[in-house]
Each structure stands twice: as structure tokens, then as C-alpha cells.
Image (tube, rainbow, N blue to C red):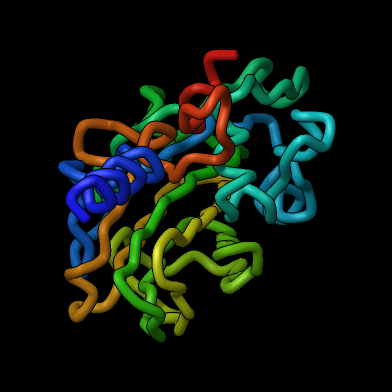
Amino acid sequence: MKKLAIFFTIACLTIAPTAFAQDWQPAGDQWIERWWALDLVTNTGGFNNSAAQDYLDAGTNGDYNNVSVSTRYGAGLTGRGAVYLPDNGGTLVWSAVDLDTEAGNNMSLAFGPNALDNFTWHGILLILSPDERTTTMYPSHDDYAEIWLNGSKVYDNPAWTGGVRNVTTPTEIELIQGENFLHYKCGEGGGGDYINLRFDETDTDLQIAPTLDGQFLNVLTPVEPRNKVTTTWADIKRK
């Protein structure tokens, strides 16, 4: 029995090597400050034009798109290479970026420049839930926001919300037990540029990545065995 117990312990550690001791972002009613985000897509021609485009699909030759990056498989693929958009910013890469949740131009500030016009933000979150639940998300944005969760669009709002922490459309969502993936796209025309997101005050047990120390690919669950050793999304990125 001792040998059997040891075997199961080792198996569990092999299956989920990154599930423990992570410095997760807090959830509940706290605004999310760190995102797995793409360099800004520029020269978009305004937020209405941006909303009609799938820059991820165009820039990866169909490897992933707006919908698929809100799934575990698609989110993992963001680590495999750049998004190539010669007319919209050039070679764009994903990284963990910080948002100032009180700044009215936090999308552009996250990448250095201040108060740009005609660009699009793409950000991804991993949301670990201990159970299946119905809860509420609270997005704010300037201008046109679209949100996908676990492969389905759950939010589509062309109107800015009137302030960086103002929410006009609280939206009910369904989380599954375990990993949930959220893709937040926001097209900016001119003036202020911001996004924000938080969950319900009862959701303090949710765990959010990127982690406080910037980990994202490394905390996704393993995808396939390779030579009897678990392969993580970070391994795939290094190929």
C-alpha cells in the first residue's frame, strides 16, 4: 500500500507540476492589474473597423484567432511565435504587462507610449475556479470591447463606459471547474483608452494568471507526454 501511495503522489506531481505554490493574482472585486497581452495593433482605422477584423487570425496564418485564444489550446499557442501584421505594427509578441487600473489611458501606457489613437488591445487571462459557478464580470472600456470566455463570445459593446472604473453592463458568465480562459479585445479610436475587469466580490477564491511574478505559459496545465515527461506550454515555446 505504501508503494501504491507513493506512485499516486508522484503521478499527481507529474500531471500538475505547476499547480502548487503559485503567486496568483487576487480576484473578487479587485481590478485585475496584470495581463498576458499582445503588443498593440496599430493603424486600425478606428474602433468600428477594428471590431470587424481578426488580427490574430491574419497575423498567424490561421494558427489561432479571437475565439481560440479563449481556450487552453489557443492560449498556449501564443507562446510559439509572433503575430505578423506589416501594416498594423509589424512583428507583435505576447508578454505579461501591467495595467494602471486608475489611468484613463492604461492600454497605451502599458506599452510605453501615451494616448495613442486607432489601435487595438488583446489581453488574455487564465481564471482557475474551484467549482462550476455562475458569477458576474464587470468590464470597463474605451472604446469598443469584445470578450470571449472558453470559446464563446460573452460580451460585445461598442460604447465606451464613461470612466476607467465605470461599468455600464455587468455581465453574467459561467465558469467551469478548473481552467477558464478569457480574451479581452478593445478597439480604440481617439481620446482616452482604457480597459478594466473585475469579478464579483464573492469570487475571492478564484486564482488569476498571469501571476504576480509574471508567469503565464508555465502555469497552464500540461498538454502531452514526451518521453514519459510532462510537456508544458513553456516547453512548446522553446521548440
Picture quadrant where residue 55 is located? top right
Whether residue 231 is situated above or below residue 198 in the rendered picture? above
Viewer-closest of 164 and 229: 229
The image shows residue 43 at horizontal and vertical percentages of: 69, 30
The image shows residue 132 at horizontal and vertical percentages of: 40, 80
Whether residue 63 is situated above or below residue 135 in the rendered picture? above
Whether residue 10 is situated above or below residue 113 in the rendered picture? below
* Position of residue 211 in the picture relative to residue 46 (left or right): left
* Position of residue 153 in the picture relative to residue 205 (left or right): right
Quadrant of the rendering where the N terminus is positioned: bottom left
Residue plotted at (41% across, 71% down): 177
Viewer-closest of 90 and 234: 234
For residue 113, say whether it is visible.
yes
For residue 39, say whether it is visible.
no
Residue plotted at (78% across, 39% down): 57
Q: Residue furthest front?
A: 1
The image shows residue 4 at horizontal and vertical percentages of: 28, 51
Residue plotted at (62% across, 39% down): 118
